[in-house]
Amino acid sequence: MSSITSPEAVINEFTDEIRPSLDYVLASTACSACLFTLLVVLFGFSTKESRRRVVFQLNVFAICVALTLGILTGLNSGKAIVDPFNPVSTGVYITAVVFALYPPLLYDSILLARLFALYPVASTPSFILVKIFAFPFCIKCARVVVIALWLNDYIEPGLTTQALVQNQSANWYRNPRMTAEWTMQMADNLYSVSFFLYNLHVRTSSIRIGGISERIRQIFYISVANFVFPLLFNIVQIILITTDRSPHTGALVLLINNFLAVVGVLCATLWFSGSEWVRSRKEPSSDDPFPLSPSPCRINGTDRKCENEIVVIGRRSITLDTADFARWGGDKFQAATNISDEV
């Protein structure tokens, strides 16, 4: 009987040992495949103009960082499954930990960049910019310091990879630094999203045009989704770190939350790039002497502006082409386009 149960016990012990690593591999592989697909779609729908924008480039950089995290996670966890007695080097393991903790600062900064659509640097007084961005800048600096202090406690000189893995539980359960980091992250995102949505509402509340109001409503939903889902994951992380002594589930939620934050920002950019791609395919060339939908004022041979061609949002006035506006349901509204670019 002992000869039968002994192999079973060994197999069960080995299964329990590799289960966390297997979960990390499955999660990182699925999320990385999703991100890579969205990246291909993003480049497929992008135009030359959209690819020159800073927000587009930051999104591509964020995706590359998340894919690097997926590769490092797969390398660490795959090595632990295939060759558990010969893990990866300490440097590779530490790099994976750093890529799991610091990139959320980048993703949150991309969300914060949407405020520049409402407060352009060139036309906004410096003291207003300081008042707006002082809090998120200070809280991001505090987050960097807190993560650095946690890494300093976790990574001790001379420790091997196996020692660092075994030391996870001691540095996980009710760790005040990681709890403070996730709490500050929620406050950071709450400030950025609420301030953006409030100003978006104030500046566009008087617009009653169908296509424009629908576009602004989509911006609102995307912005809320970019905040709500990471917020829920942050709450789950705080609950796990205060109740669960094992870091397995918490680390898995942290890993998924990293990818989820990138997907949220990417979907916003993908939505804008897709609409811009469709608009660029439908717009007649500026050199075309016979556009399909000429403006009535141009038909009359006058240079005056048509009625309802000027729309004022905040302190800016934007000129609308009535024919194009009717054709594309408001996509020619430059202010809404600028705002959606920063989502």
Image: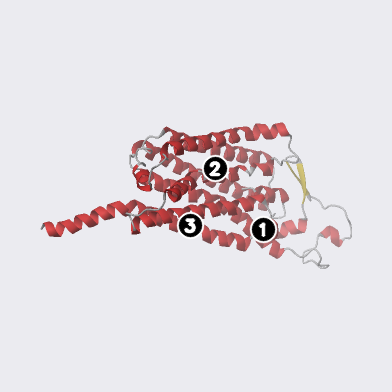
Comes first in the chain, label 1 or label 3: 3
Query: Could you say which quadrant of the image residue 157 lies in?
Result: top left
Closest to the camera, between mark 2 and mark 1, is 2
Closest to the camera, between mark 1 and mark 3, is 3
Q: Which residue was labeled with disc 1?
A: 276
Q: Position of residue 132 (x, y in %)?
A: 65, 34
Residue 209 visible in the snapshot: no
Q: Secondary structure at mark 1?
A: helix
Q: Are marks 1 and 3 in contact (CB under 8 Å)?
A: no
Type of the residue with mark 1: Glu
The N terminus appears in which quarter of the rendering?
Answer: bottom left
Question: What crowding class fits label 3: few (fewer than 14 Cα within 10 Å), some (14-19), or many (20 or more)?
Answer: many
Query: Could you say which quadrant of the image residue 224 lies in?
Result: top right
Q: Which residue was labeled with disc 3?
A: 32
Q: CA distance from mark 2 to mark 1?
A: 28 Å
Residues 178 and 259: in front is 178
For image coordinates 87% across by 60% down, the residue present is 300
For image coordinates 49% across by 37% down, the residue present is 148
Task: Judge whether 293 appears above or below 182 on screen.
Answer: below
Type of the residue with mark 2: Leu
Q: CA distance from mark 1 to mark 3?
A: 26 Å
- Judged left or right of residue 18, residue 308 is right
Question: Looking at the rendered structure, which numbered label has been put on residue 105?
Answer: 2
Question: Looking at the rendered structure, which numbered label has been put on residue 62?
Answer: none
Type of the residue with mark 3: Ser
Q: Are marks 2 and 1 in contact (CB under 8 Å)?
A: no
Q: Are marks 2 and 3 in contact (CB under 8 Å)?
A: no
Residues 343 and 320: in front is 343
